[in-house]
Image (spheres, rainbow, N blue to C red):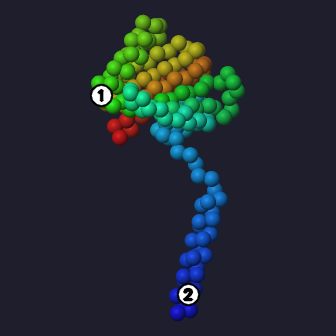
Amino acid sequence: MTMILTILFSILFLSADAGIAKTSVPTAFKSVACDFFTHDNAMKVLGSQSIGTDGGMTENAEGRSWKCTFTPNDGGESSPRLYFMIMKSPSEEAAKNSFQVIRDSNKMHNGFEEWSGIADEAIAHSDAPNFHFVMVRKGLKTIRIKVNPASGVSLDSIKAAAASLVPKMSM
């Protein structure tokens, strides 16, 4: 009986400590967009460690969207910022239509390109050193990545990050 009480007391004591430790440590806020893009991708694009700031979720007739802004730790006001958005449309037709609106508004500008061989459709638009923009659609989901200003950031690094996200867009 004494042994059982000792074991129960030990379990109660250890679990009480664990509970206190858990509540005294702040829980990290889960950001859908920041987690989807990843800090690793942000580092590859921006060239340094960054802070991801959650932009929240919006929902309207066009679907849901989540945003995140990555800012380099070592940068000042003029350093590049990476703006990421993932959208989920209510239907594939709605996703195609939204994509087409952006394509049509950019296609007549210098630096615009159709990016073939990636997902269902993809485009890239660069007006370096001002900005780089990539948009990729797969099924109901569309991602947008914009870096502004683009000085010191390669469009190829943004394309590589976008391409790495395509498999996750099926989930």
In the rendered image, the residue lying farthest to the bottom is 1
Residue 5's disc number: 2
Question: Residue 101: which quarter of the image?
Answer: top left
Residue displayed at 44% across by 12% down: 106
Residue displayed at 36% across by 17% down: 100
Q: Is residue 137 left or right of residue 34?
A: left
Residue 161's disc number: none
Depth check: 22 or 78 in front?
22
Please state which amino acid type lies under the numbered disc 2.
Leu
Location of residue 56 with respect to 148 vertically, above or below: below
Q: How far from the left and from the top, in percent, is residue 34?
A: 52, 37
Location of residue 116 with respect to 63 vertically, above or below: above
Q: Is residue 163 left or right of residue 56?
A: left
Question: Residue 63: which quarter of the image?
Answer: top left
Q: CA distance from mark 2 to mark 1?
A: 62 Å
Please state which amino acid type lies under the numbered disc 1.
Glu
Q: Neighbour class for label 1 at 10 Å: few (<14), some, many (≥20)? A: some
Residue displayed at 34% across by 37% down: 170
Location of residue 128 with respect to 45 vertically, above or below: above
Q: How far from the left and from the top, in percent, is residue 35?
A: 50, 41
* Residue 3 appears in the picture as rendered: yes
Q: Is residue 22 left or right of residue 113?
A: right
**Which secondary structure, mark 1?**
helix
Q: Neighbour class for label 2 at 10 Å: few (<14), some, many (≥20)? A: few
In the rendered image, the residue lying farthest to the front is 61
Residue at the spot of label 1 = 92
Q: Quadrant of the C terminus?
A: top left
**Which secondary structure, mark 2?**
helix
Residue displayed at 30% across by 29% down: 91
Q: How far from the left and from the top, in percent, is residue 81?
A: 59, 26
Report the number of numbered marks.
2
Q: Could you tell which of marks 2 and 1 lies nearer the N-terminus?
A: 2
